[in-house]
Amino acid sequence: MRKKKEYTQEELIKMAKIVLEEPYWIQGLSTDEYYERAHDDAEGTSTGIISVIISHGDIFVTTDDRKRNLLRFRIDSGGGESLRVRNALMILALAIKLDNEEHPQA
């Protein structure tokens, strides 16, 4: 069994800044697809769902109601002022995709 590497707080912050500082695209994610995941205490209900949607580089996030209250985080060339948040949301979309593949929810 391979031992898990432990990182210092400084190393974690440095790695986080690397992925947050520059715009990028993660292969395997699709545009105009809802990456959704219910929270761990949802107990089979349809409430408490987080959704991340990627649309032509901009990223939207919402909870529960997919049609209303979409929060948009734009790419730099589109007037984005929260590029690190946008990048973090792309990582969140990947995390949701991977969790859904490993532990599908009904």
Image (cartoon, rainbow, N blue to C red):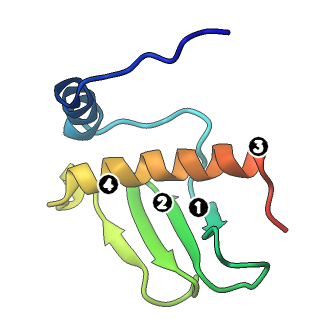
Kindly indicate whether the residue at mark 3 contacts the one at mark 4 (C-beta within 8 angstroms): no
> Which residue type carries mark 1?
Asp
How packed is label 3: few (under 14 Cα within 10 Å), some, or many (20 or more)?
few
**Where residue 77 appears, x then y in whole percent?**
20, 51
The reply, left or right, for residue 40 in relation to residue 54 is right
Counting residues from the N terminus, which is met first, the one under dot 2 or under dot 3?
2
- The residue tagged 3 is 102
- The residue pinned by badge 2 equals 55
Looking at the image, tell me whether mark 1 or mark 2 is earlier in sequence order. Answer: 1
**Element at label 4:** helix
Label 3 vs label 1, nearer the camera: 3
Q: What amino acid is labelled 3 in the image?
A: Glu
Horizontal side of 39 relative to 12 (left or right) equals right
Closer to the camera: disc 4 or disc 3? Answer: 3
Q: Mark 4 and 1 residues: CB-CB less than 8 Å, in contact? A: no
Q: CA distance from mark 1 to mark 2?
A: 5 Å
| Residue tagged 4 | 86
